[in-house]
Amino acid sequence: MRHTAASQHAADGENRRAGRAALSAPDRFFRGLVLTAAIVVLAIMGLIGLFLLLRAGSALRQAGWSFFTDFLWQTDADVFGVAGVLTGTVLIAAVALVIAVPVALGAALFISEYVTGRPRRVLISLVDLMAAVPSIVYGLWGFFFLQPRIVSLSRWLTDHASFVPLFKTASPTYAASTFIAGVVVALMVIPICCAIMREVFSQAPVGEREGAIALGATRWGVIRTVVLPFGRGGIVGGIMLGLGRAMGETIAVYLIISVLFAPPSRLIHILETGGASISSLIALRYGDSDEFGLSALMAAGLVLFLLTLVVNTAASVIVSRSRSGASTEI
Amino acid sequence: MTATAATAREIPVRDSSKPERRFRPRRFSGDDVVSVLGAMVSAVALTWLELQRLLPASGVIGFWLCWYVTFLALYTGIVWLRTRNRLAVRDQLAAALVSGAGVLVVVSLALVISYTIARGYTALRPNFFTQTMAGTGPLDPLTSGGALHAMVGTLEQVGLGAAFSVPLGIATGLYLNEVKGRLARLVRTVVDAMSALPSIVAGLFIFASVILTFGMQKTGFAASLALSVMMLPIITRTAEVVFRLVPGGLREASYALGAPQWRTVLFVVLPTARASLVTAVILGVARGVGETAPVLLTAGFTDSMNANPLEGPQVSLPLYIFNFVRYPQADMISRAYGAALALLVIVMVLFVSARLIGGSGPGQSGRSQRRATRRAAAGLR
C-alpha cells in the first residue's frame, strides 16, 4: 500500500507516477495529528489489558493454575478461581444465543426479503432502537415483568423434559436462574445479530436473485439458494458479535441471577435458582474487597477481557471479509 | 387478457373495453388473508382447549408458545389443502416463521417500553425534576425527593465523556479513511474489538488505573473517562463509515483544484459528512447515557447534589436506578422506574434526533442546506 496523496488518488490500473509528491508542512501536521489519535486509541486498548494484568498480578501469582480450576471465591482463605463463574458466563451466553440467533435470523430475513418501503425503514429503526435501550431497563423488565411469567415455563420444562441434563433441578425453585438471565440477554443480543445479518443479506447480488426468480424459485427458494449462501459470513459474524456482547453483559444479569459459587456440575442446571457470571461477580464483590480481593477481581476481569477480545476480533474479521469497502463514486 | 384468434395470421388484439391489470405475484389475495386469519383464530381456540381443559399447565408465555406451534401446523395444513403443492407449502411455512420472528422482535420491544412507561409515570411528579434525595428516606412518599442530582450527574458525565471521545473518534475515523496509513488495518480491528468491550471491564480499567494506581477519588470525572472508553469505538466506527460514504469524486475535484489534503478534509470531507457525523456523535452519546456498569465502579454514590465532577462521588441516572431498585419499599422501586423512564425518554429523543439529522446521507444536502445554497447563488447573480 502506498501512502502519499498522489498514489492514493491515482485511479486503479493507471500508471503511477514514479516520484512521490513531497508533503507540505500543514499536511504533515494534519497526518501527524490523526496518526496520534489512532495511536491513542490503540494505546487505550493496550492500557486496558496492561492495567488489568498489573493489578491482577498478585492474585494470579498466589493462585497459580488453580485459578482456572477452583469454583469458590474466598479470597481470604486463598481458595478462589473462575471455573464456576466462567461456566456460568458461557451458559448464560449459550441460552441467550439459542434464543436470539433464530429470532434474529428470522427478523433479518423478514426485514430484507419480506417487507419493503416504509415498513422496512420503520422496522430497521425499531431494531436499532432496541439496541439503544439501556441494559438496566432490560434488567428491570426481566426482573419485574418477565420473571414472574416465565417461571411456569421453567417448571413445565423441568417436569416434562428433565431427561435433558440441562433441565434437571434439585429443588423446585425457579426464580433468579441462568435461564431467565439468558432470555433477557437474548433480547439485548437480537438487535446486534439482526443488524449485521440484515446488512449482509441486503448485499446479496441482484443478478443471482433475479436468476433464481427467473428459474421459478419461490421467495423461500431465493432465500435458500441465494441470500443465505451469500450471507453466511454475516450470519457467523453476527452470531459471534452477539456472543461477545452476551458474555460481557453485566447489569441485567446481576439484577436477575442470585450469584452462586458452585461447581460447573451444579451450574449446568440452568432452570434452578442461582447462576454466575464474571461480570456480576465483579459488580457484587468490588465494594467489600480488600486489596488482595480486588486483585483477584482484576484477574477475573482480565479473563473476561481476553475472552471477549478473541471472540470479537474473530467476529470482526469474518464480517469484514463479507463486506465491501469501496468508496462511493460520482 | 382476451385475444381473438380467428385466423392464424391475425395479430391478437387486446380487448380495450377491459383495463389492463398488472400482475402482482406478491400480492395477498383474499384467500391468503382468510387462511392466515383462520389459522390464527383456530389456533387460539385449540390452544385454549389444550392448556385450560386437557393439560394442567398455565402461564402466558407458555400459551403463546403453544399458540404459535399450533398456528404453524394449522397454516401448513390449510396451504396444503389449498394448493397440494410441496413448494408452496414450504414457501408459506418459511414466510410464517420469518414473519413470526419479525413480529416477536417488535412485540418484545413494545413490551419493554410500555412496561417501563406503565411503572414509571407515577414517579414523574414535579418534585422528581426539582429535588434531590438528600433528606428523603426510603419510607417517604413519592411527593418528596427526586432525581435532579442524578440528571445533573448524567449530563456532566456524558458531556465530559463526549468531549474526550468525539475529537479522538473523528480524528481516528479520518486516519482510517482519509490517510489510510500503515496502522489502519490494526486500528480498525482494535476498534471493532473495543466496540464490544464488556462495560464492566471499562469500569474496571478506570478503577484499576485512575483510582487505584493514581490514587484519585471516585468522582464524576473518573466515570466520564470510563464512559468515553465505551463511546469511543462507536463514534470511531460510525465516523469511518460516514467518511467512506463521502463521494470520492468530491475529493478528487478538490485535489484537482490543487488543494492539499488538510484543506480537502477540512473544507470538503467534513462539511459533506456533517449531518452524519452529528448522528455518529448522538449514537455514541445514547450508548453512554445508558451505561451502568462503568459508572458503578467509578462514580461512587451520593444522595445529594454534587455539581463538581472533579471532587466527591457523583450519581447518574443509571446508578440511581441500580441503587434504588434493590430497596424493598415500593416507592423506592417506583423512583427507580421513574428514572428508568426518564432515561428511556432521553435515549429515544437522542435516537429520533439522530434519525432526523442523519436522514439525508452524506453528499445530499438537507432542506436548510439547499435553501442556503439557493441564497448564495442568488447573491452571486
Image: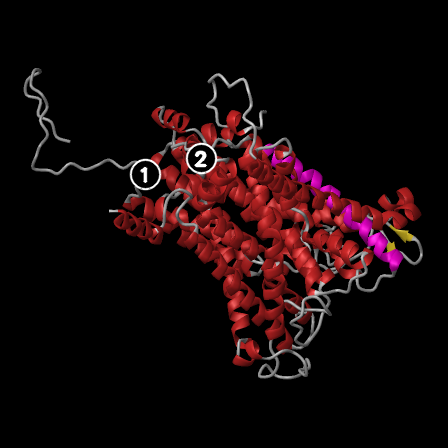
Q: Compared with residue B258, is residue B239 higher up or lower down, i.e. above or below? A: below
Q: Compared with residue A100, is residue A225 higher up or lower down, i.e. above or below? A: above
Identified by mark 2, the residue type is: Arg
Q: Which mark is residue B251?
A: 2
Residue at coordinates 44% horizontally, 35% vertically from top-left? B251
Residue at coordinates 41% horizontally, 36% vertically from top-left? B250
Describe residue B18's horizontal placement relative to residue A199 as left or right.
left
Identified by mark 1, the residue type is: Arg
Pick the residue in front: B76 or B134: B134
Label 1: few (<14), some (14–19) or many (≥20) C-alpha neighbours in 10 Å: few
Q: Position of residue A56 (x, y in %)?
A: 84, 49
Assign the C terminus of chain A to one quadrant of the image. Answer: top left
Disc 2 or disc 1, which is closer to the eye? 2
SS assignment for the magenta stretch, majority: helix
Q: Report if residue A315 is visible in the image.
A: yes
Residue at coordinates 41% horizontally, 54% vertically from top-left? B356
Q: Which mark is residue A10?
A: none
Q: Hey, which quadrant is residue B362 in on the image?
A: top left
Q: Compared with residue A51, is residue B125 higher up or lower down, i.e. above or below? A: below
The residue range painted magenta reads A291-318
Q: Position of residue B317 (x, y in %)?
A: 61, 67
Q: Secondary structure at mark 2?
A: helix
Q: Position of residue A284 (x, y in %)?
A: 77, 61
Q: Which mark is residue B26?
A: 1
Assign the N terminus of chain A to one quadrant of the image. Answer: top right
